[in-house]
Amino acid sequence: MTIEEPPQARGPVRRMSREERREQILDAATSVFATGGYAGTSTDDVARAAGVSQPYVVRFFGTKADLFLAVFDRITAQIIDRFEAVAPGPDAKSRMAGAYTDLIADPTSLKVLMHGFVIGSEPAIGARARATFARIFALYLDRTGGTAEEARNFLAHGMLLNVLFAIEAPQHAATGGALADLVRCALTGEGLDA
Amino acid sequence: MTIEEPPQARGPVRRMSREERREQILDAATSVFATGGYAGTSTDDVARAAGVSQPYVVRFFGTKADLFLAVFDRITAQIIDRFEAVAPGPDAKSRMAGAYTDLIADPTSLKVLMHGFVIGSEPAIGARARATFARIFALYLDRTGGTAEEARNFLAHGMLLNVLFAIEAPQHAATGGALADLVRCALTGEGLDA
DNA sequence: GACGTTAGTTATCGTCTGATACCTTGTCAA
DNA sequence: TTGACAAGGTATCAGACGATAACTAACGTC
């Protein structure tokens, strides 16, 4: 996805610190994993997106599985951070919804999240996924003071939107029909505080 | 998954009709695609599960992508059939929920469904996925006479359960904690007719 | 019972992929 | 200035994978 400019004159090659490079590779990996998923993305895809060599990527993270886990971990941590930042209060429900809206503004991370979920039988991924669900569920209860049913509905609605974005429903809803009604209804999010 | 008995005495090899074999391979493919997804499953995995040779599987369906599409198509058709069989009436809502409960009794197909959803940017898969969503949404409205919000909540709740099963949340909820509360709340499905 | 058809196999190929080994070159401190 | 360390590349491999080609044998039909 990220287009790397050609070698061009090849001046004294800029070198990054380990932490800088790590973040950059994780960014690139997030981008390519979002479309291809774990098995459908090669370490070479990641390397090209990051503008480094393929062996460097795998040696940096040890193994491809470790790389994906690092990406997945970072994403779940970011998401949890977002929801943790919501302060308790009377309008906490709408602010929790707003936090999710912020996340959906860049669907890349959410796509990787969903890719991780569907390979959740992989122990390391599944464990992280379950912990994330449990944490957000608990956070919703804590911040909003709502019921368990409301917290469940919040998560359910989030999963529906993640899937609708994954199958590109919004882009194809312009033609009208039942899909358009569903997308409109899901995006406006009416009747969720019941 | 399906264990094939060893050659043993090798009597006159039973041959199946094309239709029989097709269904059997699709069954086997559904089983292995459920855990590995599209990219994470080889045609050899499918062949072994079906008890046939790998080249036969490929030639039978043309290409691996065609095979997955056939599996995905069959699953979406089965699911739609299930919901179409629900008759209209005053208790149609609970019967729609019951139809989903039937589906979840064997999570294999639902796992493949979710695998298809997350690679929904693939045009052929995405188109089928959107059509399936639109159809179920319309069916819910028609059979129950409910509101769009209720139909959306029905789908959302289904997606949440699909994900919770994918990450094996029910199996890990025994230890208690927030995850157990979420799973219990999601499985009992209280407060969904609001 | 011969024969075309169709279900299925074995052999094999070209490519992709993750990983390892080894080499090169900035960068920074003494 | 120099030398050690760390960033990053090149070369290469062994196995997996999808696909094709060519062959074999069961089945229905006349």
Image (cartoon, coloured by chain):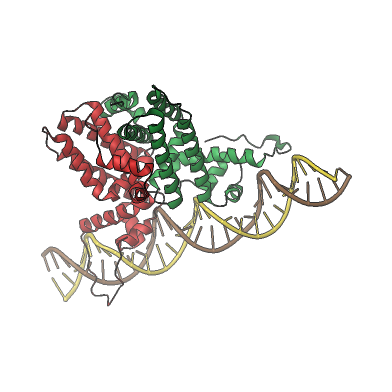
Chain colours: A green, B red, C yellow, D brown
Badge count: 0
Tell me where residue B16 appears, x and y as whole percent.
21, 62
Task: Report the quarter where the C terminus of chain B lies.
Answer: top left
| In-front residue for pair B67/B98 | B98
| Residue at 29 percent of width and 70 percent of height | B5
| Residue at 38 percent of width and 33 percent of height | A141
| Residue at 32 percent of width and 27 percent of height | A186
- Quarter assignment of residue B183: top left
Query: Is residue B77 left or right of A17 when viewed as pictured?
Result: left
Whether residue B128 is visible, yes or no, is no
Task: Report the quarter where the N terminus of chain B lies.
Answer: bottom left
- Quarter assignment of residue B3: bottom left
Q: Tell which residue pokes out farthest to the bottom in this image.
A: B9
Residue A153's place in the image compared with A42, above or below, is above
Tell me where residue A79 appears, x and y as whole percent.
46, 35
| In-front residue for pair A94/B41 | A94
- Quarter assignment of residue B137: top left
Tell me where residue D21 appears, x and y as whole percent.
39, 60
| In-front residue for pair A25/B193 | B193
Tell me where residue B9 appears, x and y as whole percent.
27, 77
Whether residue B21 is visible, yes or no, is yes
